[in-house]
Amino acid sequence: MYQLELKYGCNPNQKPARIFAKAGTLPLQVLSGKPGYINFLDALNGWQLVRELRQATGLPAAASFKHVSPAGAAVGLPLPDTLRRSCFIQDEPLSVLACAYARARGADRMSSFGDWICLSDPCDASTARLITREVSDGVIAPGYDLDALEMLKRKRGGFYNIVQIDASYTPEALEQKEVFGITFEQERNTLEIDDALFMNIVSAKKALPPDAKRDLKIAMITLKYTQSNSVCFVKNGQAIGIGAGQQSRIHCTRLAGDKADNWWLRQHEKTLNLPFLETLKRPDRDNAIDRYISGESGDVLADGAWQTRFTHQPEALSGDEKRAWLGQLTDVTLGSDAFFPFRDNIDRAARSGVRYVAEPGGSIRDDAVIAACDQYGMTLGFTGLRLFHH
């Protein structure tokens, strides 16, 4: 098959629409459903991301994509109890790939609502069971176990989008796109993110332990497929905050830092023990948790309509409790797709437990950024590599 007709393009008025191969056949098959234009943009960007994470770390990887940027990305490390509880996962055995997916989906559950799921390895039954519980548009993987495929085909009444991609496919070196009838052409960004990228440590603190190096690779590979400007906070093999598509670097850092803080606050004991009604749907729980975390003291809990989500009135999470809990978030890594032009990015990063930073360097204010990292005891590496993605 060399082409697929699509329902429409980015919007319903944009017809006709299709994806096609200029030569040979498409390196993918639709096993169920009818993915759309944006679905395929998410699927193909996400597939590249998880494939590179797999190659860079040796671990199965997963990503949650929305509107051509990842809401979350992770590798398959075991889930501690707090993460399981914050993702509504009971004490069931999880495959390594399922752990990667749970982490990717659990990074920013609000943004992941209705996402596209990308898996580096063939989807197994453990991962499929998690996927069936969440609201998503579809999934792309290099293969599917038979029982996993049967589970996924029952999702959405049999209309769930399932795409299988040829893992051996390598596109041409040059890529093209059209804007306003003008064709743009460039060499694909095939630069490899590896340990050598983090050798130029410019801060006073030089320590970069293996786990931090792994997390910095995850951050930079994630940024490689995130709409620019972008920054990415990572902890324990999981992107915990991604700031994508902002015109200002500090707004990227604030957005990503706030998401990282919310990820951590979801693991506070009060949040984990919110007395939800058993009949409350998962998206409604996510919305309630987000509002609970963002509320100051008892203001949110005073909303009578909002209280109907609980069996009884929950105890408020005070500002002092939030600050104390956020103070325990440590050893976070931060990657940036371009240099930090001001130290304010480092000041904001320090509030979310960042200890290790990678950015290209090259700003006229590099000295101020280095000084800020030294003030906070951070390790800063200049990669010399910009990773804009548009």
Image (cartoon, rainbow, N blue to C red):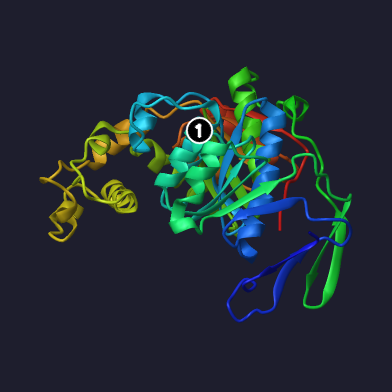
Task: Please provide percent x and percent y for residue 200.
Answer: 75, 27
Q: Is residue 30 left or right of residue 260?
A: right
Identify the amino acid type marked 1.
Ala
Task: Please provide percent x and percent y for residue 226.
Answer: 64, 50
Towards the viewer: 224 or 115: 115
Quadrant of the frame with the N terminus: bottom right
The residue carrying pointer 1 sits among few (fewer than 14), some (14 to 19) or many (20 or more) residues within 10 Å by Cα, namely many
Q: In this view, does 126 lie to the left or right of 89?
A: right
Q: Is residue 249 above or below residue 315?
A: below
Q: Residue at x 58, y 39 (%)?
A: 62
The furthest residue to the left: 312
Residue named by callout 1: 98
Q: Which residue is drawn at 41% across and 29% down?
A: 329
Q: Residue at x 51, y 50 (%)?
A: 153
Task: Please provide percent x and percent y for residue 95.
Answer: 51, 27
Task: Please provide percent x and percent y for residue 350.
Answer: 48, 35
Towards the viewer: 146 or 294: 146
